[in-house]
Image (cartoon, rainbow, N blue to C red):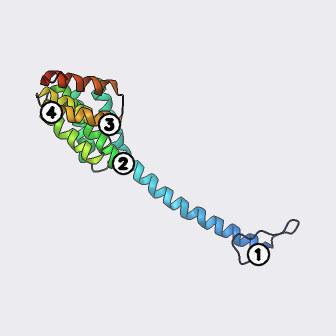
Amino acid sequence: PGDPTWHPPRGKSISPWRLGGLIALGTLALVFVGISLTRSMRTRIARGRWNANADRCATLVDEGQNDAAIRICTEAIDSGALRDRDLAIAHYDRAYAYLNKGDNDQAISYTTEAIRLTPEMQEAHGIRGQARHSKCEYDLAIVDFSRAIELEPGDPVALANRGVAYRDKGAYD
């Protein structure tokens, strides 16, 4: 009976006192789980507005509304509510908007921050490679495209971009 894995033998019942104790423990456990969930939900609600801004930023980039995307991404980043991969994605989206505008230095800066936060973000390596290629920094672009290929072998965009960088560098071997 003192063993937590103990179960009553078949055909015997649990005493009402023991049953009451188990119900009380179960209720107490649910209260503690409820408190934890409530705190987690409050955090998510507080962060929700900024996560929504991060999602909106990506949509604006896809729609070609680069200035609006940069503004919304900056608000989401500056809020302090984004963490880890969400923060890296916001930096990546902002970088992509700058790349679309032709501001390669800003694109490199923000993809570098995204890569610092999430080194395995394959897309960020590819976008930084494109920005470096646009600046005729072919060796650095090749490094970025190669890393993108390492992270996602066979990616046709990264393979093609690396090939173009080699060609533009004059390395035909």
Which amino acid, by three-letter code, is at mark 4? Asp
x and y percent of residue 136 in the render? 11, 27
Q: Where is 137 relative to 117, above or below? A: above
Residue position marked by numbered label 2 in the rendering:
47
Q: Secondary structure at mark 1?
A: helix
Which disc is residue 133 wearing? Answer: none
Alpha carbon distance from label 4 to label 1: 76 Å
Give the mark nearer the N terminus: 2 vs 4.
2
Crowding near the residue tagged with mark 2, few <14, some 14–19, many ≥20 C-alpha atoms within 10 Å: some
- On the picture, is 88 further left or further right than 25? left
Residue sitting at x 32%, y 42%? 120
- On the picture, is 98 further left or further right than 61? left
Observer-nearest of 52 and 169: 169
Observer-nearest of 91 and 15: 91
Observer-nearest of 22 and 105: 105
Which disc is residue 17 wearing? Answer: 1
Residue position marked by numbered label 3 in the rendering:
150
x and y percent of residue 47 in the render? 36, 48
Which amino acid, by three-letter code, is at mark 3? Glu
Give the mark nearer the N terminus: 4 vs 1.
1
Crowding near the residue tagged with mark 1, few <14, some 14–19, many ≥20 C-alpha atoms within 10 Å: few
Q: Secondary structure at mark 2?
A: helix
Alpha carbon distance from label 3 to label 4: 16 Å
Alpha carbon distance from label 1 to label 2: 45 Å
